Amino acid sequence: MSFKNYIRVKVRYHAPLIQSVVGVESEELILEEGAKLKDLLKKIARARGRRLEQWFFSEDGELNQGILLIVNGSVVHDLDKDLNDMDEVLLTIPFDGG
């Protein structure tokens, strides 16, 4: 018998548009140990519908340019980034301040 280990990841949604689509400002999600950033996004999208999955991912499975991901304070572009227990992921929308 094998037991799976799990990690907890805090997700904050930092944009009114994202919050209106997701329905919450933040949440804590449980993922299997070894989960990647893309696994987290897929879990969020599965829980809230296909529309959100299309918003997160381009047709080739890459992160859409309209989404900015920050993990533990650092901008991340690699969806294959490993997540660890107690990581904090911020989903927001990039903007041009100019």
Image: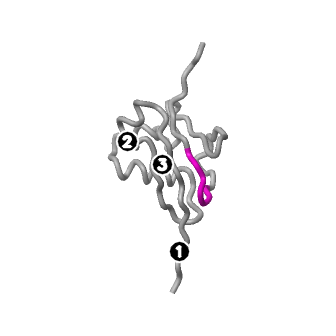
- For marks 3 and 2, the one nearer the N-term is 2
Residue pointed to by mark 2: 22
Q: Quadrant of the C terminus?
A: top right
Residue 92, horizontal then vertical, whole percent: 51, 34
Residue count near mark 3 (Cα–Cα under 10 Å), binned few <14, some 14–19, many ≥20: some
Q: Between marks 2 and 1, how big is the CA–CA gap? A: 28 Å
Q: Between marks 3 and 2, how big is the CA–CA gap? A: 12 Å
Residue 33, horizontal then vertical, whole percent: 57, 65
- For marks 3 and 1, the one nearer the N-term is 1
Residue pointed to by mark 1: 4
Mark in front: 2 vs 1 = 2
Point out the stretch of residues depicted in magenta: 83-89
Residue pointed to by mark 3: 41
Q: Amino acid at mark 1?
A: Lys
Q: Could you tell me which residue is drawn at 50 percent across and 52 percent down?
A: 40
Q: Could you tell me which residue is drawn at 34 percent across and 40 percent down?
A: 51
Residue count near mark 1 (Cα–Cα under 10 Å), binned few <14, some 14–19, many ≥20: few
Q: Is residue 87 magenta?
A: yes
Instruction: Say how the picture is coloured.
Output: one colour
Residue 62, horizontal then vertical, whole percent: 53, 41
Residue count near mark 2 (Cα–Cα under 10 Å), binned few <14, some 14–19, many ≥20: some
Q: Amino acid at mark 3?
A: Leu
- For marks 2 and 1, the one nearer the N-term is 1
Q: Between marks 3 and 1, how big is the CA–CA gap? A: 20 Å
Residue found at the far right of this picture: 74
Provide the secondary structure element on which disc 1 rests: loop
